[in-house]
């Protein structure tokens, strides 16, 4: 069952990343004579009020959310690793300062933190700028968790006898970290990145839903979901319902796969 789930997630993510190849139409292509069409063989999910294919826009929007989520997860894990390694390895005032900063970020509700950080940035930017802003905002809100876990591993590892022996033999701090401690941290980093991916995809969807992410005419999942706020769309257009259900299914399967992977990793660590 778990293998089937991972296979389904792999196929879905591959389809989203290959949106320019698999999408029947460009995300901005308009067919004004076929506006608000129900799902057909020409428009798999139907078309919007501008005659744009909703299935194509679903793929392009998912590609944007997935790339933003992957980039943000990687950035948050790298920031968390750097902060946790410095705090755990060197200790002292640096440890105290970094942990107090992380506690401040953890104490704030992540949604309010995201909106506060986003409010300080330009409202309208290009596609690349929007991706950079989303990644930056998500990474700033997500680094404390990995940082505190990495710190714990470094605190425990540097007390072990073989670390003292390595120091006695003249090993540098960089050598000790890369050769002795990093192998212990690496599985944790992969697990944290997998855990953060669906959360940061949801961040991308939330920002675009609120009009703070990438705007029209580019496709975003949040922008497509925002169309459901209009009663006329809710009442008459099943295509948006199909799109919303597909978005929810992808996010649910991603979270389900991540939860299973995290439990499996925890079980392996416990057994070891």
Image (cartoon, rainbow, N blue to C red):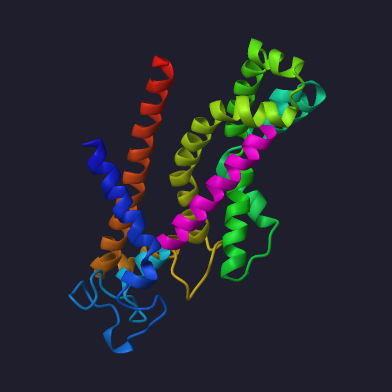
Residue 103 shows in the view: no
Q: Nearer the viewer, residue 37 or 63?
A: 63
Residue 5 within the magenta-colored segment of the rendering: no
Residue at x-position 37% and y-position 84% = 30
| Residue 29 shown left or right of residue 178 in the figure | left
Q: Which residues are magenta?
A: 62-84
Can you give x and y, in whole percent of width and height, for residue 87 in the image?
Answer: 72, 27
Percent position of residue 189, x then y: 53, 35
The spot of residue 93 in percent (x, y) is 82, 24
Q: Is residue 193 left or right of residue 92?
A: left
Indicate whether 134 appears above or below 186. below
Quadrant including the C terminus: top left
Question: What residue is drawn where x is 62% and y is 29%?
Answer: 179
Q: Quadrant of the N terminus?
A: top left
Q: Which residue is most to the bottom?
A: 33
Query: Residue at point 58% right, 33% down?
Result: 146
| Location of residue 79 by image quarter | top right
User: Which residue is drawn at the image coordinates 28% and 55% (left, top)?
Assistant: 245
Q: Taken as a whole, is the magenta stretch helix, strand or loop?
A: helix
Residue 117 horizontal side relative to residue 19, left or right: right
Vertical arrangement, residue 160 with respect to residue 150, above or below:
above
């Amino acid at each position: 069952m778990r293998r089937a789930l991972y296979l389904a997630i792999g196929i879905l993510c591959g389809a989203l990343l290959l949106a320019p190849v698999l999408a029947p139409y460009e995300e901005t292509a308009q067919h004004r004579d076929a506006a608000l069409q129900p799902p057909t063989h020409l428009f798999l999910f139907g078309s919007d009020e501008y005659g744009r294919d909703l299935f194509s826009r679903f793929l392009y929007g998912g590609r944007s959310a997935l790339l933003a989520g992957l980039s943000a997860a990687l950035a948050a894990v790298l920031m968390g690793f750097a902060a946790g390694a410095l705090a755990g390895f060197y200790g002292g005032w640096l440890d105290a300062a970094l942990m107090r900063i992380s506690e401040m970020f953890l104490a704030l509700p992540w949604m309010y933190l995201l909106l506060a950080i986003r409010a300080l940035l330009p409202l309208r930017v290009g596609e690349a700028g929007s991706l950079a802003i989303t990644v930056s905002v998500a990474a700033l809100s997500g680094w404390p968790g990995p940082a505190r876990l990495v710190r714990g591993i470094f605190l425990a590892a540097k007390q072990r006898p073989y670390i003292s022996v390595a120091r006695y033999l003249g090993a540098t701090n960089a050598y000790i970290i890369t050769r002795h401690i990093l192998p212990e941290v690496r599985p944790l980093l992969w697990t944290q990145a997998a855990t953060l991916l669906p959360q940061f995809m949801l961040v991308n969807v939330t920002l675009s839903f609120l009009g703070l992410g990438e705007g029209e005419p580019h496709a975003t999942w949040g922008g497509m979901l925002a169309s459901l706020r209009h009663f006329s769309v809710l009442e008459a257009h099943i295509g948006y319902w199909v799109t919303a259900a597909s978005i929810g299914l992808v996010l649910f399967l991603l979270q389900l796969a991540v939860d299973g992977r995290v439990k499996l990793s925890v079980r392996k660590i416990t057994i070891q």
